[in-house]
Structure formats: structure tokens, C-alpha cells
Amino acid sequence: MERQVAALKDAIKDARQGTLFPADAVAIAVSEETVQATLSEALPIEQTVADRFRARIERVVVSFRAMQGSVRLEGRIWALAEPGTFADLVLLGGIQDLEIDKETGVLKAEIVLDGWEPIRAAAMGAEVEWIKDLVRLLGARGLVALRDLAPPVRIPVGIEHGIDLPGFSGGGVTIPSGRLPLDARVSKVLPLSGRLWALINVTTSGWQRTGEGAGR
């Protein structure tokens, strides 16, 4: 909620100034379904937690509403000594630090966990006590103990590093081949109406001649 309130305040300020969607930025919209399908490909994820437990995430739900990019991860955590002692687990978090991978040009981000909750449990005769034990063991380590259960966010949108143009020669006209390098950066992220809007600023250092005579 703190992230959402801060994002809403910034969005209202930008909207009043007419800069919510800057005219010089490239807007890329990605649906909830696309990001959810991409994250689902990385599942299931299974990790040992607090040395005594094993956790497995099997389902993810993504929502982009009212400046909130929220993620719900669902799975199960169980005792290593007694696999029949388990709890259904929910991790709640958000997507942040959206950026363009410099090597692949793909949009990437991280899931930051805000909280977790055991929903339903089954134990060998002491259900309530086992849940208290789990909460106590994980309490000191907090969400750090569970962060490896969050899959990486890789959005299937590619940003090219440059534009290559072939040379031309004929009819008394010669145009050398060249390349226009592009530097693309995410300037703003807007989770609105079921879509994640990424506003991209693109700059260039200028035309570069390639091929024969490039150094002249």
C-alpha cells in the first residue's frame, strides 16, 4: 500500500502537469496475462527454508491496477522431518525496478516480497502448535528466507540496440552503409487497467558509418 500510495501521488502530479505520458517517450503496454504466463513458465520453484522446511511455489497471479503491480505466489511449505506436516503458503509482493537488459534488450524486473501467510495446515496431531513454530522460525529472518521463491520477471519485449542500414550505389548515387546506435532506458512504469505501461526514452550518439571506408 505504501508503494501504491506513493505511485498514485506521483501519477496525479504528472497528470496535472500533462506529463503522465510524455510525448517524447515510447509507450509499451504488457497485459497481466502475458506477464503471468511468463512467470508461470519458471514454476514450480522449490527451496529449503530455515533449514527445517521445504517450500514449493506452483501458481502465480499478477494484477496491474490503480498504480499497483501486485504479485501473489501460491504454494506449500512442509517440514523436512515430516512431509505429512505442511501448510498452504501465500506470498504477496510487487514488481519493481523494471529496466532493459543491456545484453538481450528484454525488459526485466524483480518481485519484492511484502508479506507471507500460511493459509491452511495439516499436522501430525498438533496443527496449531506447528503453525506457531513455523511463524516463530521464519519471523527472525522475515521475507529474506523466502525471497528465492520469487521467479525472475522477464517480459517478452525486445528493444534493439541500434538500426543498421545497408549502403546503396547506383545511378551516380552512393550511400554508405551505417548504423544508428540507440540507448533505451525505462523512464516510468504505470500499472493501469490490467496493463503494465513502460515508458521508454530513446537517445542516440549519432550516425556511424560502417563497412569500407568507415574510418575515413
Image (cartoon, rainbow, N blue to C red):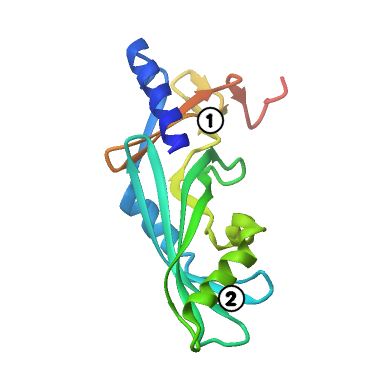
Q: Position of residue 184 (x, y in %)?
A: 53, 30
Determine the CA span between mark 1 and mark 2: 41 Å
Q: Position of residue 107 (x, y in %)?
A: 49, 43
Q: Position of residue 208 (x, y in %)?
A: 61, 24
- 1 or 2: mark nearer the eye: 2
In this rendering, does residue 199 appear at all?
no
**Crowding at label 1, few (<14), some or many (≥20) Cα neighbours within 10 Å?**
many
Q: Residue at x 69, y 73 (%)?
A: 51
In this rendering, does residue 178 appear at all?
yes
* Residue 146 to residue 3: above or below: below
Q: Residue at x 29, y 43 (%)?
A: 194
Name the quadrant of the N terminus.
top left
* Residue 193 to residue 118: above or below: above
Residue type (three-letter) at the residue carrying disc 2: Arg
Q: Position of residue 127 (x, y in %)?
A: 47, 80
The reply to whether the C-beta atoms of the residues labelled 1 and 2 are less than 8 Å apart is no
Residue type (three-letter) at the residue carrying disc 1: Ala
Q: Tag 2, which secondary structure? A: strand
* Residue 97 to residue 42: above or below: above
Circle 1 is placed at which residue position?
A: 184
Circle 2 is placed at which residue position?
A: 54
**Crowding at label 2, few (<14), some or many (≥20) Cα neighbours within 10 Å?**
some
Name the quadrant of the C terminus.
top right
Q: Which mark is residue 24?
A: none
Q: Earlier in the sequence, mark 1 or mark 2?
A: 2
Q: Residue at x 43, y 45 (%)?
A: 157
